[in-house]
Image (cartoon, rainbow, N blue to C red):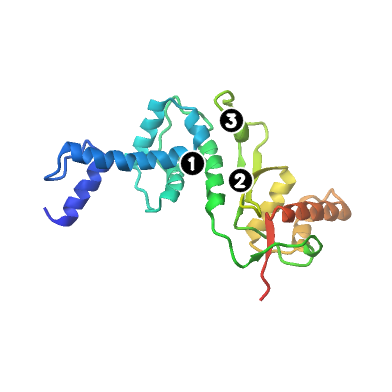
């Protein structure tokens, strides 16, 4: 057996011990390798999704991680990205069991965002924006901030609180990293969520662009009310470094 086939047999067995042992290898030796790899994957996934894990028995959680380990073709060699691969597994391949909570995917995504924002690289071209310059400089959503919406009350889910039905209104959040590199979750009202979504979609826009869009979206509100409310909102978001500007060339 050539090296490539030997290597493939080695990887196949590590992922699924029902496959044949690689030629010349003993069960005891291969089991050491498999436990090492599986425990690493289990540790990274469990650490990234502590609330979700707490809702399962140890056996049920191990079974879920084993299914991910055996069946999902991870595309990254970077351990810190394993949690993102787990999200992809839940979204595209996993068939929920009877005991899986209905909010499983939303809770997993909510927890994953914390790790994502904690580890995303800063954009060296971004700069904090002063309150008095919000109406003048181009605005953008920081790379260390993101907006997400969920149907379930994900921020309150725990062993003692597991909703079986979606909330009457969706839950919107901004997850961002502040100047001290701490990750924060900011619950958004519908208007703030819409404004941040508009800025994110535009990639870069000006205060007047946001105001024009708001005027078209909320024609029942006076221009003065919209302008004052939008400016105050953006100033608060700039303080948190959720929105920023770009370094001027």
Residue 148's disc number: 2
Is residue 100 toward the left or the right of residue 117 in the image? left
Circle 1 residues within 10 Å: few <14, some 14–19, many ≥20: many
> Could you tell me how far apart the alpha carbons at marks 3 and 2 are, in whole angstroms?
17 Å
Which x, y percent locates residue 14? 26, 42
In the foreground, 182 or 14 = 182
Choose the circle earlier in sequence order: 3 or 1: 1
In the foreground, 100 or 247 = 247
Q: Residue furthest bottom?
A: 249
Residue 157's disc number: 3
Choose the circle earlier in sequence order: 3 or 2: 2
**Residue found 67% across the figure and 31% down from its top:** 168
Residue 48's disc number: 1
Is residue 16 toward the left or the right of residue 167 in the image? left
**Residue found 47% across the figure and 32% down from its top:** 53
Which x, y percent locates residue 74? 37, 49
Which x, y percent locates residue 9? 19, 47
**Residues at circles 1 and 2 in contact by the CB criterion of under 8 Å:** no
Which x, y percent locates residue 19? 20, 39
């Amino acid at each position: 057996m050539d090296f490539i086939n030997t290597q493939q047999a080695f990887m196949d067995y590590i992922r699924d011990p029902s496959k044949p042992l690689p030629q010349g290898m003993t069960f005891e030796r291969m089991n050491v390798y498999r436990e090492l790899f599986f425990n690493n994957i289990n540790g990274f996934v469990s650490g990234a999704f502590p609330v979700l894990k707490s809702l399962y028995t140890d056996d049920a959680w191990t079974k879920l991680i084993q299914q991910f380990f055996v069946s999902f073709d991870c595309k990254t060699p970077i351990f810190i990205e394993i949690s993102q691969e787990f999200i992809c597994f839940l979204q595209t391949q996993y068939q929920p069991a009877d005991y899986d909570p209905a909010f499983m995917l939303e809770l997993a995504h909510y927890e994953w965002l914390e790790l994502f924002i904690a580890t995303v690289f800063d954009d060296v071209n971004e700069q904090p924006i002063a309150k008095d310059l919000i109406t003048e400089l181009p605005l953008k959503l920081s790379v260390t901030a993101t907006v997400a919406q969920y149907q379930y009350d994900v921020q309150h889910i725990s062993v003692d609180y597991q909703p079986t039905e979606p909330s009457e209104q969706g839950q919107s959040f901004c997850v961002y990293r502040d100047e001290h590199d701490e990750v924060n979750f900011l619950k958004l009202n519908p208007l703030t969520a819409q404004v941040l979504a508009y800025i994110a979609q535009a990639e870069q826009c000006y205060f007047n662009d946001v105001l024009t869009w708001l005027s078209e979206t909320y024609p029942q509100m006076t221009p003065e009310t919209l302008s004052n409310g939008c400016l105050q909102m953006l100033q608060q978001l700039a303080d948190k470094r959720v929105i920023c500007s770009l370094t001027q060339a």
